[in-house]
Amino acid sequence: MKYFFLSDGWVVGRVWEFGGQWNVNAWRREPEIVCINLCIIEQGEKLWLYRVEDAVLMVEVKPTPDASANSTKTIGQVVLKRLITAEQAIERLSTAQTLLNALDFEH
């Protein structure tokens, strides 16, 4: 499995695998992308941990329409996220300013 952190108010867009952009017809399914319900807070920003299957190489993330309209911190409309290993995710969780479980507040 691979992981990435996604800012609150952002969503996953396109997904890439080894052969290029994820093709639902070829794979006969959507890519497996699951929110782990763990959140870290860094510099006042909530970052949610997501798990993806090994076939996924990179994901495109973009702000939700509400987030981009209400935020002046949004630099661009789309960001490509490189994925991290489980060890890198654990290291980031262990050094985070604040670690929260989704049960602590509503996501």
Image (cartoon, rainbow, N blue to C red):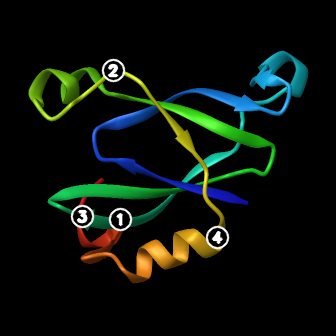
- Where does residue 55 sit, x and y in percent of width and height? 81, 43
Identify the mark at residue 77; answer none if there is no mark. 2
Identify the mark at residue 42; answer none if there is no mark. 3
Describe residue 46's horizontal placement relative to residue 80 as left or right: left
Q: Looking at the picture, which amino acid does disc 2 mark?
A: Gln
Cα–Cα span, label 2 and label 4: 28 Å
Crowd around label 2: few <14 · some 14–19 · many ≥20 (10 Å):
few
- Badge 4 or badge 3: first in the primary sequence: 3
Identify the mark at residue 39; answer none if there is no mark. 1
Q: Looking at the picture, which amino acid does disc 3 mark?
A: Glu
Q: Looking at the picture, which amino acid does disc 1 mark?
A: Cys
- Badge 2 or badge 3: first in the primary sequence: 3
Quadrant (top left/top right/bottom left/bottom right) for the N terminus: bottom right
Crowd around label 4: few <14 · some 14–19 · many ≥20 (10 Å):
some
Q: Looking at the picture, which amino acid does disc 4 mark?
A: Ala
Cα–Cα span, label 4 and label 3: 19 Å
Cα–Cα span, label 3 and label 1: 10 Å
- The image quarter containing residue 71 is top left
- Badge 4 or badge 1: first in the primary sequence: 1
For image coordinates 14% across by 59% down, the residue present is 44
Which structural element holds mark 1? strand
- The image quarter containing residue 70 is top left
Q: Are marks 4 and 1 in contact (CB under 8 Å)?
A: no
Q: Nearer the viewer, mark 2 or mark 1?
A: 2
Q: Nearer the viewer, mark 3 or mark 1?
A: 3
Q: Nearer the viewer, mark 4 or mark 1?
A: 4
